Image (cartoon, rainbow, N blue to C red):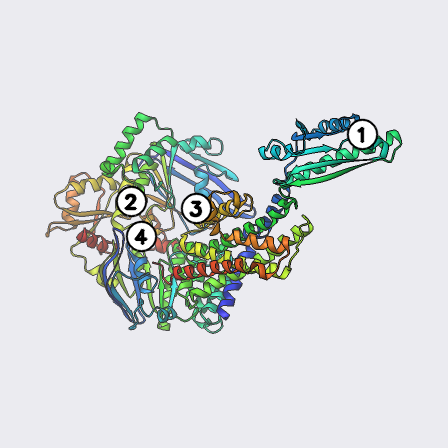
Amino acid sequence: MIEVRNLKKQYGDLIAVNDVSFSVNEGELFGVIGPDGAGKTTLFRMINSLIIPDSGSVSLWGLNPVTDYKAIREMIGYMPGRFSLYEDLSVEENLEFFATVFGTTIEENYHLIKDIYAQIEPFKKRKAGQLSGGMKQKLALSCALIHKPRILVLDEPTTGVDAVSRYEFWDMLIKLKQNNITILVSTPYMDEASKCDRVALMQNGHVLMVDTPWGIENGFSTSLYGLKTINKYKLIQFLRSSVSCKSVYPFGEYLHYCDKREDVNEKILIEELKQAGFFDAIVDEVKPGIEDRFMELMGNVI
Amino acid sequence: MKRLKAFIKKEFMHIFRDSRTMLILFAMPIAQILIFGYVVVSDINDAKIGILDKSKDVVTREIIYKLVASGYFQISDYLIHENDIQALFRRGDISMVVVFESGFGTSFNKEGEANVQLIADASDANTARLLCNYAEGIIYQYSLEQNKLMGYANHLNTEVRMFYNEELEGVYMSIPGIMAMILILISAMMTSISITREKEFGSMEVLLLSPLRPMQIIVGKVVPYVVLSFVNTITILLISVFVFKVPIQGSVLLLLFVSLLYIILSLSLGIFISTIAKNQMVAMFISLFALMLPTILLSGFIFPIENMPFLLQALSLIMPPRWFVIIVKKIMLQGVGLMYVWKEMLILIGFIVLFLVLSVKKFKVRLL
Amino acid sequence: MNEEVVIKVSHLYKKFGHFTANDDLNFEVFKGEIFGFLGANGAGKTTAMRILCGLSTPTSGEVNVAGLDVGTCADAVKAKIGYMSQKFSLYEDLTIWENMRLYAGIYGVNKNEFRMRGEELLRELNMCDERNRLISTLSLGWKQKLAFMVAMIHKPQIVFLDEPTSGVDPITRRQFWELIYEAAANGVTIFVTTHYMDEAEYCDRVSIMVDGRIEALDTPSQLKIDHNVSSMNDLFLKLIR
């Protein structure tokens, strides 16, 4: 299992990772979720031994990435942010290269990558540079898996990939758990949190919270109302000016609204909106999502 | 070993699949050597010459007229005495002097033979050679015309003399220099670019996390370029021998060995550059500006080192191409053996060790 | 919402050899509308948007943007639209004000007008005191917001946004959408291309492209009802697979 304790890394004035602690259990699909610049990549590079932390420690099944990096590199499968395949080599040549470099063969571990690789095998003579984003992603995952790693570290594997490929990719990760591979994955997309066993929410170098997706959503502190009207912009302006407004954010077709008053409900809100001239307004109490909680937690830190 | 082999195979694939790389690797050296070999010899127009006419008769006048009429020459001085030639050359006023022996016309008409001497300033060897060739041609043409007209079978002997550089080293001189430049440019630039490319695309991260050791990555990057640069060396030598007729006086084997040493030196320099450069662009600029200009200017390839200010002379000592040029000149042109070049070879080896140690030290197993 | 049509596309085809990137596209976009233009990688979104912006010519069909035919007056169209791409937005080594002045210059905004417009945009972002900061010192979220404002410096009728908020933190992202709502409320038409479905939910109407054709076009809520799905993401998966 992975133990991260008080990890810190600073570049000049910028604290990329600030006092981060969490642990990942064996066989878990663990997500690190946060916007660009939250420190996810730096965190992953400290875990996989590419960067030495300023302070704090990492332990992978008792091994320390700073001192035991050779042993750790043997057991990690890593997929950096940009898929980092060789674009001028074919699909097959890429896979073969990484297999040989890791001292194995495609045949030996084919069972591990079969489900994923089978989808791109028809194009195995094609250059990696000519693949679509989704196919590149599958090839990169195959390359990271070919040496049967114990931990898979995936840095933003779904960035820049369309919704279908993202969906398929998460399916593949969930299937991989059967092989008892511990998976550490980062993403800027909040909606992907629900696919993970547990997630860490990250912002400005801090881990805001670590919990199951369910636990995070349930931690939302107050009632959340979804408001809908044809003129969202006017409604936002109106709510912002009201004294009882705790927070209001656009949320897709809706506005997500929290009220400072304890005794408020849908009926009261709808009445208030009608009085203000929003006759078409619809108000429903909604179940908070990860993103709502993330914003609440961000508000606390700021 | 298997890993290293797979890595080297991959590198060859990168090279052979990129037409631009192939162009730089193979077309550029050939183009460069041809350009330097031919184009540097510029065409001649109105070259200033001096005339030392000890005879002053009809024949010499006619020949002088022909020279001027050709458009190649312009007479700027009439000399009185042979001793003045040196002074004129030193001042750089003229590049050739035509000397007619006394009684030139008489001996040409009566004895059927006369002597004319062409003395050229060979510090610019290419120009000197051209001037003499043109003048010789004009004089020969004149004798043919006269013979036809008068029904003679007379003969004009032209004797060519070169001042300052009797062996006309210029053309030969440039071959070792061009070799030094092409090899260092291509080897250092290509390796540094190919290593920084991996950094830029992020694949270096994956390689670092693989069981490949830094030394293997470096060796894997270098081996393909050693092979290809060696092929280049042979091409350059073949061109210089068969196109430019530069003889190889000494041992070909020794020459190839020294070239190999120099290639490895250039590659280790390339690796060193890649450890300091963050991306391909920086690598290319360092290679071009830090290597090409000093090689051209300070290796004695174009400007003689003896004429440089002391500071630049000192600086040229740490220019690896300088030593390579010396060795190649000695082997190719003077035909000496290992006994005479081992010191310079040791210097090259010293450079290799220095750059490799620096690179392996700087090549990190981590990112930061 | 206004019924005035600002983009009208009829029977648009774009072929590259045998490959048809845009296959008979037909749609209208209204003034002040936030129009989402969605599709998987390679569905033909980028091709269509390039045509709308006057960067590429259609193989056949009519495209009318801001009252002008794109085929014949591409340059006049360019002056009436703003464009913000996800990859390239602002020059990192110039300050905020310098970037604004640069784009104002490019779009031919005169000096006095620019001074007023620039102040106005900065005020809206609450960045009046930071005008001399270099872009490279700003966070991604600020850069995106600023890039949007810069795209509006010449008061365009239509602004094209290419995946405007991917990778931005949730709060900043909402601030960004509020800017968009405000612009739309002022009558600017917003045309957003993206393959992130949660961005789609913010739009007034969305079209979904699959293999060069528009497979669905309506308000997000109507689309969800029609296809009996709970989210745009589900709809997208349903249409594409």
Q: Residues within 10 Å of mark 4 (few under 14, many from 20)?
A: many
- Quadrant in which residue A8 is drawn: bottom left
The residue pinned by badge 3 equals: C45
Q: Are marks 3 and 4 on the same chain?
A: no
The residue pinned by badge 1 equals: B105
Residue A121 lies left or right of residue B249; in this view the side is left
Secondary structure under the numbered disc 3 in the rendered image: helix
The residue pinned by badge 4 equals: A36
Q: Are marks 1 and 3 on the same chain?
A: no
Q: Nearer the viewer, residue C208 or B11?
A: B11
Secondary structure under the numbered disc 1 in the rendered image: helix
Secondary structure under the numbered disc 4 in the rendered image: loop
Q: Are marks 4 and 1 on the same chain?
A: no
Residue C40 lies, in percent from the top left, at 42, 52
Residue B6 lies, in percent from the top left, at 51, 66
Residue B150 lies left or right of residue A50; in this view the side is right
Which three-letter amino acid code belongs to the residue tagged 1?
A: Gly
Please count the marks in the image.
4
Which three-letter amino acid code belongs to the residue tagged 2?
A: Thr
Separation of residues labelled 1 and 3 (CA atoms): 91 Å
Separation of residues labelled 2 and 3 (CA atoms): 32 Å
Separation of residues labelled 4 and 1 (CA atoms): 94 Å
Q: Quadrant of the N terminus of chain C?
A: top left
| Label 2 close to label 1 by CB (< 8 Å) | no
| Label 2 close to label 3 by CB (< 8 Å) | no
Q: Quadrant of the C terminus of chain C?
A: bottom left
Residue A236 lies, in percent from the top left, at 21, 42
Q: Nearer the viewer, residue B3 or A147?
A: B3
Say which chain tag 1 marks.
B
Mark drawn on residue C137? 2
